[in-house]
Amino acid sequence: SFQVKRAGTDLLLFSIGKRIIKAKILERPDGSYFVSVGDNKTMTIFGTDEALGLRLRMEGMATIMLPTLYDPSELRSEFNGKIVRYLQDDGAMVKEGQSYV
């Protein structure tokens, strides 16, 4: 199991199975976060809110995409642009893989 608990204004406790990991977080003026994990690991994390979820870029490590929970009746795209034409009527059922715009 995986749980996150706030233990202070700048301290989070992550429970992963029977292991507990402490993370101290400091927000920086540029909007990024300085994170200190355990006794000796530190990293800078940049977060970007995008149409499909939250993108976390951990400097020197990885980029992680946390998808937004979505309503399957909503139309969403990861690309900006303008819809020129709908191919289906409003309220019509659309099968998986079927074009709709």
Image (cartoon, rainbow, N blue to C red):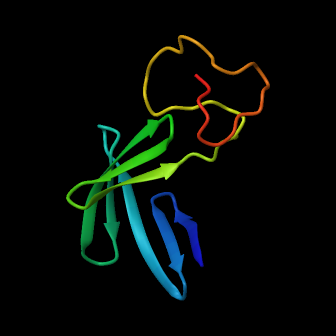
Q: Quadrant of residue 18?
A: bottom right
Q: Quadrant of residue 89?
A: top right
In the image, residue 73 above or below residue 26: above
Residue 13 location (% of width, % of height) = 50, 72
Q: Nearer the viewer, residue 91 or 16?
A: 91
Q: Nearer the viewer, residue 73 or 98?
A: 98
Q: Quadrant of the N terminus?
A: bottom right
Query: Which residue is at 63% across, 47% downward?
Result: 69
25 horizontally vs 94: left or right: left
| Residue at the left extreme of this rendering | 60
| Residue at the right extreme of this rendering | 91
Query: Which residue is at 56% across, 64% downward?
Result: 6
Query: Which residue is at 52% across, 63% downward?
Result: 8
Residue 4 location (% of width, % of height) = 56, 68
Residue 19 location (% of width, % of height) = 49, 86
| Residue at the bottom extreme of this rendering | 18
Residue 42 location (% of width, % of height) = 26, 65
Query: Which residue is at 58% across, 71% downward?
Result: 3
Q: Nearer the viewer, residue 37 or 53?
A: 53
